[in-house]
Amino acid sequence: MFQSLKKKLNVFIGRTEEKVEKRAELSTETKVRGILRPKIRLSEEDLENILYDLQLDLIQSDVAVETTDAILEKLRSVLSGREIDKKRVHESIEESLRRVLREVLTPDKEIDVIDFVKNSSKPVVLLFVGVNGSGKTTTVMKVANLLKKNGFSVVLAAGDTFRAGGIEQLATHGENLGIRTISHQRAADSAAVVYDAIEHAKARKIDVVLADTAGRMQTKTNLMDEMRKICRVNKPDLRIFVGDALTGNDAVEQARAFNREIGIDGSILTKMDADVKGGSALAITYETKKPILFVGVGQGIDDLKRFDVDWFIGEILEAS
Ligand SMILES: Nc1nc2c(ncn2[C@@H]2O[C@H](COP(=O)(O)OP(=O)(O)O)[C@@H](O)[C@H]2O)c(=O)[nH]1
Ligand SMILES: [Mg+2]
């Protein structure tokens, strides 16, 4: 997974290692806990050279420009002036990188969706937003399945009233799971559909409402108006951005737009099973400061994984 990013980060570690080893020949000895060790520091020039190369590599791996700059800045401050133990050059650089990546992947607030649903007053309303084809409807089904498995009752709101077949797609999936879908006719007001689903949930004491939405072009202001209206009328507990990891920087741009226009609480990145570069996960978290709640790893109902920062960092740092 994430071969592109993994390869590039390993190249960075290798390059840094080389520079450090060259410096080692010139270094003086220092006593650390009674043991003589060579004291190695990267020169400023070496550091700038490797960071320059890393910058291009990260951008090519879908890490957006602002996130790349942040990573470089953090690495610069971690590595400059730092004494590196000759016996642990590789580990030491990897450790620095790990620390920086963890910082970039730390949102303002972590959210565990199952705990969130457990601890919120019912019905809990989760709204899924994102552009066409990003995987919203599929993800709504996966989350419905997960919640059901955890003992919660669920109702779906067919908020994509725009796309032909949008309502049927959701209803059919719902039937397979034994979950009711609330829908209106095509082109109906999606805010009203979600409202009805919430009323239904209240009347039947259903725990969770999952609201699907339309996603025609994020640049069109009427889509954002529609999302704002859904939010104003229905006050969802979580506004979840669904992005297609295969689209790389476009997904980052969309996350930024939805966050700016309606304010998101977290993201779900889909199609992580495909050959994605990996950088968009870093950029989406860094730029929205909101957690990645899940990743989609296939078209099946169970192909949803909790996004675990350690797992992700392990994947992108482990030598290929
Ligand atoms: N490989 C893969 N395909 C996915 C994933 N999530 C969604 N898809 C596919 O992406 C396409 C669009 O999904 P859909 O849910 O209809 O997107 P929507 O327009 O945002 O509702 C469908 O063919 C899905 O099967 C995923 O995690 N992995
Ligand atoms: Mg859909």
Image (tube, rainbow, N blue to C red):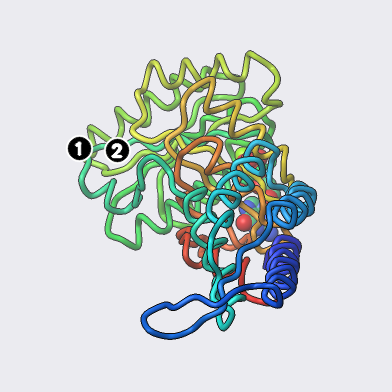
In the rendered view, would you say 3 is above or below 240? below
Labels 2 & 1 near each other (Cβ < 8 A):
yes
- State the residue position of label 1: 121
**Residue that appears at 66% across and 46% down:** 244
Residue most extreme to the front: 28
- State the residue position of label 2: 124
**Identity of the amino acid at label 2?**
Val
Q: Is residue 97 left or right of residue 2?
A: left
Check the picture and name the quadrant holding the C terminus. bottom right
Residue 169 visible in the picture: no
**Residue that appears at 63% across and 66% down:** 316
In the rendered view, would you say 34 is above or below 313? below
Give the SS element for disc 2: strand
Q: Position of residue 33 (x, y in %)?
A: 36, 80
**Residue that appears at 59% across and 74% down:** 28
**Residue that appears at 35% across and 23% down:** 235
**Identity of the amino acid at label 1?**
Ser
Q: Position of residue 228 (x, y in %)?
A: 48, 17
Q: Is residue 6 left or right of residue 174?
A: right
